[in-house]
Image (cartoon, grey):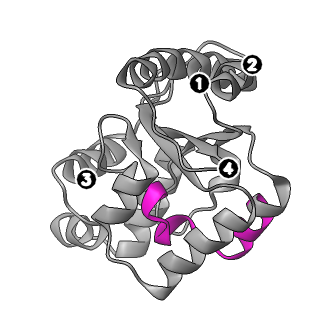
C-alpha cells in the first residue's frame, strides 16, 4: 500500500478507526505511516476532534480532499494551528477515504503529500477500491482472526439505534432515562 500511494505522490498515510468523543485514537490505528514527531504532537495536542480533516470522516461517504474538509469547517486559531504544524512536518495536502472496518465501525485512511497535489479522478477511484481491501486485511492480521460479528446486549443495540437516528449522547440518555456518562460507557464497551 505504501508503494502504491508513494507512486502517486503521497509520502505519508494513516489507517485508523474513528474514536468516540474523548477516546484516544491510538488504540484504533491499523497502520501508521505519519512522521513519528507529528503523531506525538497530534496526540499530545489532542487534535483529532478539532482537525477538519479528521472530523469530515464522520460525515463523508466518499473520498475528500484536505482542502475541501478545511473549507467545510469554520477556521479557528486551533484549526489554523493544526494546519500550520502539519505543514511543518511535511503534511501539506492530502486526501481522505472514509470506510468501515471489518466490524462495521467507521474508519478513515488519510494520505498526505509534502506539497500541494491534484489527483486525477481515475486515481481517486483506484484508491477508493484498494484502500478498503488493504485496511480489511491489515485489520484481520491485527485481530489474528477473521472479522467477527459483534455481540451486543439489548441495551447496547438500543443505544446504537438512537445514535443511528442522529441522537446525541445527551439525547439518548434522556430518552432512555440514563445519565450521559452511562451512555458514554456503553459506547466505549460497544466499540471494544
**Quadrant housing the C terminus:** top right
Residue depth check, mark 4 versus mark 1: number of the one nearer the observer:
4
Residue 21 covered by magenta stretch? no
165 in relation to 52, above or below: above
Give the Cα separation between the discs numbered 4 and 2: 34 Å
Give the Cα separation between the discs numbered 3 and 4: 37 Å
Residue 45 covered by magenta stretch? yes
| Residue 186 shows in the view | no
151 in relation to 93, above or below: above
Label 3 vs 4, first from the N-terminus: 4
Q: How busy is the neighbourhood of tag 3: few (under 14 within 10 Å), some, or many (20 plus)?
A: some
- Tally the marks: 4
* Residue designated by label 1: 135
Stretch of the chain drawn in magenta: 39-54
Q: Which mark is residue 163?
A: 3
**Tag 3's secondary structure?**
helix
* Residue designated by label 2: 144
Give the Cα separation between the discs numbered 2 and 3: 30 Å
* Residue designated by label 4: 114
Amino acid at each position: 500500500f505504501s508503494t502504491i500511494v508513494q507512486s502517486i505522490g503521497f509520502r505519508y498515510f494513516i489507517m485508523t478507526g474513528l474514536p468516540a468523543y474523548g477516546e484516544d485514537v491510538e488504540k484504533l490505528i491499523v497502520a501508521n505511516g505519519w512522521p513519528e514527531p507529528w503523531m506525538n504532537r497530534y496526540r499530545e495536542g489532542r487534535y483529532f476532534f478539532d482537525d477538519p480533516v479528521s472530523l469530515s470522516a464522520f460525515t463523508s461517504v466518499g473520498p475528500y480532499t484536505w482542502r475541501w474538509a478545511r473549507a467545510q469547517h469554520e477556521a479557528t486559531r486551533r484549526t489554523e494551528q493544526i494546519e500550520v504544524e502539519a505543514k511543518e512536518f511535511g503534511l501539506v495536502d492530502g486526501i481522505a477515504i472514509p470506510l468501515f472496518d471489518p466490524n462495521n465501525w467507521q474508519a478513515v485512511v488519510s494520505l498526505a503529500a509534502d506539497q500541494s497535489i491534484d489527483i486525477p479522478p481515475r486515481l481517486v477511484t483506484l484508491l477508493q477500491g484498494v484502500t478498503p481491501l488493504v485496511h480489511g486485511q491489515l485489520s484481520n492480521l491485527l485481530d489474528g482472526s477473521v472479522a467477527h460479528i459483534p455481540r451486543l446486549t439489548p441495551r447496547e443495540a438500543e443505544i446504537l439505534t438512537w445514535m443511528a437516528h442522529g441522537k446525541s449522547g445527551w439525547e439518548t440518555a434522556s430518552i432512555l432515562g440514563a445519565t450521559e456518562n452511562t451512555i458514554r460507557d456503553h459506547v466505549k464497551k460497544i466499540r471494544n
